[in-house]
Image (cartoon, rainbow, N blue to C red):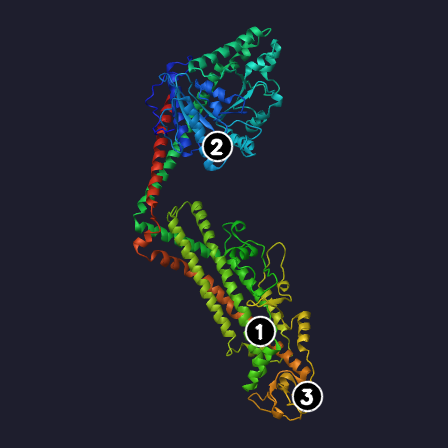
Amino acid sequence: MATPTATKTPADKSKRSQPHHHSHDSSSSSSSLSRFEAYNRLQAAAVAFGEKLPIPEIVALGGQSDGKSSLLEALLGFRFNVREVEMGTRRPLILQMVHDPSAHEPRCRFQEEDSEEYGSPVVSASTIADIIKSRTEALLKKTKTSVSPKPIVMRAEFAHCPNLTIIDTPGFVLKAKKGEPENTPEEILSMVKSLASPPHRILLFLQQSSVEWCSSLWLDAIREIDPTFRRTVIVVSKFDNRLKEFSDRWEVDRYLSASGYLGDNTRPFFVALPKDRNTISNDEFRRQISQVDAEVLRHLNDGIKGGYDEEKFRPYIGFSSLREYLESELQKRYKEAAPATLALLEQRCSEVNIELARMDSKIQATSDVAHLRRSAMMHAASISNHVGVLIDGAADPAPEQWGKTTEEERSESGIGSWPGVTVDIKPANAILRLYGGAAFERVMHEFRCAAYSIECPPVSREKVANILLAHAGRGGGRGVTEAAAEIARTAARSWLAPLLDTACDRLAFVLGNLFDIALERNISRESEYGRKTGNMDGYVGFHAALRHAYNRFIKDLAKQCKQLVRHHLDSVTSPYSQVCYENDFQGGFSSSATSYYKHNQASAASFCLELSDGGQESCDATMKDQENINPGKNVQQTTPGKGTEAREALRECQLTVPETPSPDQPCEVVYAGVKKELGNCIEVGPRKRIARMTGNRNTEQLKVHNGGSLLFGNGDSGSRSSSAYSEICSSAAQHFARIREVLVERGVTSTLNSGFLTPCRDRLVVALGLDLFAVNDDKFMDMFVAPGAIDVLQNERQSLQKRQKILQSCLNEFKNVARAL
């Protein structure tokens, strides 16, 4: 079927005469028709542009077999097989009936989808049905739904129809049709309730006469929408079927009054329509309607003993009575609503004019580079300012919505747990949703807890021997100390470096989240104070470039901070660093590293300010004995010198196998340090000792007799060598703790604060400006004038102009209507 060409509704071309009510004079009919045409045009505009206007409308609703379609055909004055296609089943249909004496045959036109224009007239009844069916199927396929609230609008001009507009809704059903989703009945009920809920709509509820009021399923649904039936017109359809059951007047009067169910002030209409569905002419169809009305009245008067209360019920009997009432009631509502509609139209016209002016400015700005630069710079500066405020401390927008818990930060950042730490680090306020400076400080505290939970890992005898004997071979008086320090430095580089990288990544994630929060804060501030820091709405390219520049700035800060903290780590782990030899560690090896561990533990805990409901979770729980995993190897190790498990592991390391040297074997000497450090020298074989005096007067080497070599731990010296190994491990743990404390407390904390926060406060706006605005005009305009962007803006402007024109036309019509009231 060819698609009709689109044309406007020729409201001014059609000659209108009086409505169907002969009781009205010519002047009244003319004003009523003017109101009707004005509301029809306004309704068409509202449907086309999605305007929500309180236009008085009649909404027809009822069960699928209760006669809605037959009633609509009777009101139109012609049939178009509406029942066969079930046009009201899945999509609403707005029927705009216009009484036009010159239209001897019905002229029907459908409003184009998403437009206020109407297509060419459709004459064939079967074509009308086909259009309704095809449009319904096309929309449901597009939206992938079983029902849709988007209406089809059909305008029918005919000499035998009243001036009336009715919205036909999908009929209520108890069970979905074959091939439809099972929830289709619920979807229909929900949609119909939504269409019927606006208080400016009149409800036309149909129920066939065979259903008793007390057992009506759909009457209860209507009560939910309009409990008192104040705006509901109840129609009992197929009245002729029930009429045959009455013989006495009291029976029919009691039924017609519906007392006890609808209330004293509610009077239902009783209608019967022709049952003949054979193909007949429109004239014959209308004749049959009049004939059925006459037969019903004749039966009430002559077929019922005593007749019926004609004075009370005659205005509610027959189709003609219902038609006249609906037309007069709608005109009454039109007249009452005209002043409020006029005021609302003036408001909407004003709003559309403002939108149109804004669109004109936006189109003009696409060629005004200076204006765009100024607006873009103001917007970027505003976002940078909000980022600074959030870092300094703010609670707007709501942290409950925009903040994140520690677990959410770990999950969304993709970083997960801290490398080398097997226990779950739970810093203070971990369950609170924080952002900005608060979230930054929480990550810093979490880093401290993670760092202090790692101790110097155990070192094998082979590693100790390789390091220690190399230092002993080079001479000097601090071989043992140097060996322990070297072990500690190696462990610190291996275990603490991944922690530093993770801390930088986590802090960068916290700062990266501030962009969206700053945008939200900027929007709320602009709406609150009614001002715009440069109208950047709709410039998708610019917003994407701004976000990219911000993310790149944070990424660069993270990279710089990683280099700075790695420099600190290299500094404190350098052989030339004096960290391991400060006065805190000059008291000998008898002092345990545990004291430093506890000191550092307290240092980390000092940063806890628990605000969550669960109370403070001590960092002691985080830093209990644990097995540390080397980030480079998936091997569990137990830190020596920590708790029972560590001491047990240490005892196993100290087990030696005593060996008695044979007199004819070369004697091997166990390395022994100076008395001050490891106790007395250990001699094997002939007691011969050669002391080498060093600058600090410590004896650190033994001369080997009979060509013996320097080895760590063999012969009868097993117990003493185990003691030496233990002391070296203990010394290494002390050095590691000192390195960790100096790194975390003296270097990293201040570096991360100054490396991340200071640039965000002081340099962000400059960095964004250089990135976005220090470019030539052509490159700058690429952010605003993407291919086809101007065409899109022009199309939006044309749509606004069209809406403005239609609303202004409706406003002028309503002004004329208001003058006639």
Mark 1 belongs to which amino acid? Phe
Residue located beneath label 2 in the image:
149
Using the numbered discs, state the Cα–Cα distance from disc 2 to disc 3 in whole angstroms: 101 Å
Mark 3 belongs to which amino acid? Pro
Above or below 599: residue 144:
above
- x%, y% of residue 332? 45, 21
> For this rendering, which residue is in front, 515 or 500?
500
Answer whether residue 744 is visible to the viewer in this image. no
- x%, y% of residue 592? 64, 75
The quarter of the displayed image where residue 797 is located: top left
Above or below 446: residue 178:
above
SS at circle 3: loop
> For this rendering, which residue is in front, 85 or 625?
85
Q: Give the label on residue 661, or none.
A: 3
Foreground label between 2 and 3: 3
Using the numbered discs, state the Cα–Cα distance from disc 2 to disc 1 in whole angstroms: 72 Å
Q: Give the label on residue 541, or none.
A: none
Foreground label between 2 and 1: 2
- x%, y% of residue 528? 45, 45
Residue located beneath label 1 in the image:
736
On the rendered image, what quadrant is the C terminus found in? top left
